[in-house]
Amino acid sequence: MTIDTLRQVPLFESLDNEAAAKLCDLLETLDCKADTFLFHAGEPGNAMYLIERGKVRICVQAIDGHEVTLTEMGRGDFFGELALLDGQRRSADARVAEDARLAVLSRDHFLSFMRSNPNVALEML
């Protein structure tokens, strides 16, 4: 994950090079096969995801039980960023639609970064 790619996320666009590099170091790479669920609706929000390659679908279950795709995302897209801020339960499922490589930022890593960089935290808000 490059600093420029990280800055495509509105939450991180104001980071200077040093802060962005520190945050990039906290990202973990996750390779996933198609049809892998990253999370399900109702689970705690504990990370955000940036798509480096492949595709991910955000879906919900309809009342009749069939899956409804809300959106399909690809390279350069991101999702789950609200989990970094509020840790609330997921409102939808995320399923890999095409073999993917994701950069994952856990909420714990993000909060630790914010505590150790309070000036950066203020800039981000």
Image (cartoon, grey):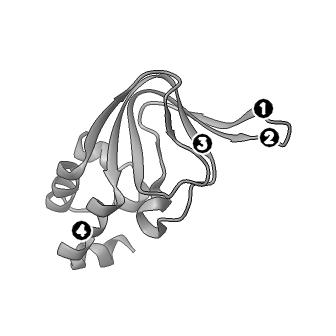
Measured as percent of width and height from the top left, residue 61 is found at: 73, 40
Which residue position is annotated with label 4? 112
> What secondary structure is found at the residue carrying circle 4?
helix
> What secondary structure is found at the residue carrying circle 2?
loop
> What secondary structure is found at the residue carrying circle 1?
loop
Left or right for 43, reference 85: right
Which residue position is annotated with label 2? 62
Which residue position is annotated with label 1? 66
- Residue drawn 49% across and 61% down? 82
The amino acid pointed to by label 4 is Ser
User: Mark 3 and mark 1: span between their CA atoms?
Assistant: 13 Å
Q: Are marks 2 and 3 in contact (CB under 8 Å)?
A: no
Mark identifier at residue 103: none
The amino acid pointed to by label 1 is His
Label 3: how many Cα within 10 Å (few below 14, some 14–19, many 20+): many
Label 2: how many Cα within 10 Å (few below 14, some 14–19, many 20+): few
Q: Are marks 3 and 1 in contact (CB under 8 Å)?
A: no
Which residue position is annotated with label 3? 93
User: Mark 4 and mark 1: span between their CA atoms?
Assistant: 39 Å
The amino acid pointed to by label 3 is Asp
User: Mark 4 and mark 3: span between their CA atoms?
Assistant: 27 Å
Label 1: how many Cα within 10 Å (few below 14, some 14–19, many 20+): few
Label 4: how many Cα within 10 Å (few below 14, some 14–19, many 20+): few
Measured as percent of width and height from the top left, residue 91 is found at: 63, 54
Measured as percent of width and height from the top left, residue 5 is found at: 32, 43
Lower position in the chain sequence, tag 4 or tag 3: 3
- Residue drawn 44% across and 68% down? 85
Lower position in the chain sequence, tag 4 or tag 2: 2
